Image (spheres, helix red, strand yellow):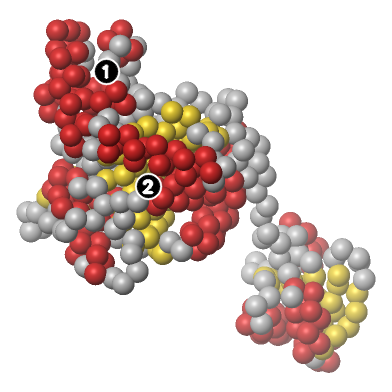
Amino acid sequence: MKFKVPRGTQDILPSESWKWQKVEQMIREACEVYRYQEIRTPMFEQTELFQRTVGDTTDIVTKEMYTFKDRGDRSMTLRPEGTAPVVRSFVEHKMFGWVDQPVKLYYIEPMFRYERQQAGRYRQFVQFGTEAIGSADPAIDAEVIALALDVYKKVGLKDIKLVLNSLGDKDSRTAHRDALVAHFTPRIDEFCSDCQNRLEKNPLRILDCKVDRDHPLMKTAPSLTDFLNDESRAYFEKLQDLLTKAGISYELDPNLVRGLDYYNHTAFEIMSTAEGFGAITTLCGGGRYNGLSEEIGGPSAPGIGFGMSIERLLLALEAEQVPLTNDDALDVYVVTLGDAAKQEGFQILQQLRSSGIRADMDFLDRKMKAQMKSADRLQAKWVTVIGEEEVEQQIVQLKNMAEGSQQSVSVEKLIEIIQAEVN
């Protein structure tokens, strides 16, 4: 029987994995500058955590979660998004009592959603996200947005844009909800079954429907911005002022609705404007969630965060033809001729590695010519040749591959020469 990678997943081979490492390294460097610290949560959580926080009317909960019963007959779910587990950890470990507030965290972890595979979208995907919990200041919203944009700039993306909206506070959303119900009710039978179910539970989710996005009522639906109360409007204006003063350009989109129920006030997306990127242009999405901690039994702890797919980031780099450099060239390739030379060569190989020098050798008992070809393919800067004579004299023949020069050196001198070049 032949086995294949599960549908909606992928093997990331060494020819591609270095790109992931490069991008993740740049992400970690950006987080360090902003003083966000890494958190790692379990790959699965109690199902109820996501039902209570993400929302039982969302596509994630109703259609996309990987849920199973464990041996204790408890319902568990593979993590479909990162915010709920982080907030659960925030509450469980009483981070609200830490001296430094807000608590600023980031993660780079696999997520799991049973959805239709598309370019850059998988059923197992890696998400980089941040959560800043403990502040209701619009300045922290601006900081989170700035960090997301800085990550994209750091990796080299230029064709991106920031889109903003305000979802308002509870009172604003209640007024908008009533207006949406009145707007859609007369013709709700023309919408899909999901939208019909959402009408009473969460009509705002109708605006996020992919099936009925072109229905005429979508274009004339009441805008949430028209229902913002004074407090919500002032909050949104402060955020815009902060972004403008920081030199961050943005577009306002009153129809921007995030796909998770816990968002309020700030909602944002960063999109690719690169030609040929694809129909789905969103690279990153996030927003504010002021009641999430209380929803799972914690104290009041307003938060804001975002999530960005590493797969789609790499796709955007491809679309813009941004090169990533792979600094994977080998420092030294050890060529050996004969059994005694191989034993000596392996000892030298380990000495080189212990000194922080990237080194490798042949393990297939190939002829010298084949070994030299391997050194070329691995872009080795130096080659050491060891035969019977070199073993007896405790030396190696050291060849500089770029210059073509060669010299006889002792093992101690060999490490000294290479380290001077490497450092």
Q: Using the image as rendered, state which of residue 119 and residue 134 is in the foreground.
A: 134
Residue at the spot x=25%, y=26% of the render? 227
Does residue 1 show up? no
In the rendered image, which quarter contains the C terminus? bottom right
> Is residue 53 visible in this depiction of the protein?
yes
Across and down, in percent, residue 338 comes to 74, 78
Extreme residue toward the left, this view:
73
Q: Earlier in the sequence, mark 2 or mark 1?
A: 2
Q: Residues within 10 Å of mark 2 (few under 14, many from 20)?
A: many
Instruction: Name the residue: 24% across, 65% down.
Output: 96
Q: Where is residue 384 drawn, in percent x and y? A: 79, 75
Q: Residue at x 45, y 32 (%)?
A: 163
What element does badge 1 sit on? loop
Mark carried by residue 182: none
**Hey, what amino acid is under mark 2?**
Pro
Residue 222 marker: 1
Distance between the Cα atoms at labels 2 and 1? 25 Å
* Quarter occupied by residue 64: top left
10 Å crowding of disc 1: few (<14), some (14-19), many (20+): some
Residue at 40 percent across and 42 percent down: it is 238
Amino acid bearing label 1: Pro
Direction from residue 39 to residue 311 in the image, left or right: right
- The residue under label 2 is 138
In the picture provided, is 139 more to the left or to the right than 411? left
Quadrant location, the N terminus: top left
Tally the numbered discs: 2
